[in-house]
Amino acid sequence: MDAFLLSTAVIFVAELGDKSQLMAMTFATRYRVRQVLIGITIATAIVHLASVGIGAWVGNSFADKQWIISIVAGVAFLVFAAWTLRGDELTEDEADKARRSTGKAIIAVGIAFFLAELGDKTMLATITLATQEGWLGTWIGSTVGMVAADALAIGVGAVLGKKLPERVIKIGAAVAFLVFGLILIAEGLGWF
C-alpha cells in the first residue's frame, strides 16, 4: 500500500505540466474524453509495467547496496526537479499529429502516449521508485497517478482553456521532487 500511495503521489506530481497533459487536452478536443482516458491508461500501464520491471531488477540486483540506490535515486529526483522547472512543451508538429490522427481513438491515443512516455521523466521516476518499493504497488500507483493527472488536465483545460497557472504548477512539482530527492539522499547517507 505504501508503494501504491507513494508512486501515485510522485507520478501525479511528475506529470503536472508535462507534454503528456498537453497531448491529453489536444486529443480531448478531437475524441470523447472516455476514449482518450482509456488510451492513456492502456499505454501508461504498459510503459510503467516495463519501468517497474527494470526498477525491481535493479533494486534486487543491488539489494546489499540500498544506500547507493537511495543516493542515486535522490540525485535522479533532483534532476527531475530541474527538468520540471525547465518545462516540457508540446511541439507544433506533435500537436498537429494529435489533431490529425486517424483511426480508432483509443488506438491513436494509446500509440501516441506509449511513444511519448518512452524515456520521459514519469517513466524514469517509476523506475526509480521501483528500485525501493514493491513492483505491484508502484505499477498500479504510477499508472493511477499519471491517468489522474492527465484527466485533471483535460478537465481543467476544458474549464479554463489556456489560462492554466503553468508557472505555479511547475514550481510546485519541482519543489516536491526536490524534497523527495533530498529525503532519499539523506536516507542513503544514514541521516534517517
Image (cartoon, rainbow, N blue to C red):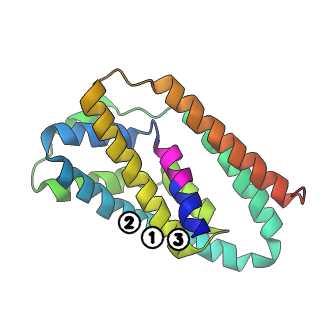
Residue 17 drawn at (x, y percent)? 45, 35
For badge 2, the amino acid type reads: Ala
Left or right of residue 55, residue 32 in this image: left
Does the CB distance between marks 1 and 2 fall below 8 Å? yes
Residue 56 drawn at (x, y percent)? 60, 74
Q: Nearer the viewer, residue 25 or 88?
A: 25
Does the CB distance between marks 2 and 3 fall below 8 Å? no
Left or right of residue 181, residue 86 in this image: left
Q: Is label 1 in a helix, a strand or a loop?
A: helix
Measure the C-alpha gap from mark 1 to mark 2.
6 Å
Mark nearest the camera among 2 and 3 is: 3
Per the rendering, the mark at residue 18 is none
Task: Decide: is 165 above or below 49.
Answer: above
Q: Is label 2 in a helix, a strand or a loop?
A: helix
For badge 3, the amino acid type reads: Gly
The furthest residue to the left: 103
The residue that mark 3 highlights is 137
Per the rendering, the mark at residue 49 is 1
Measure the C-alpha gap from mark 1 to mark 3.
11 Å
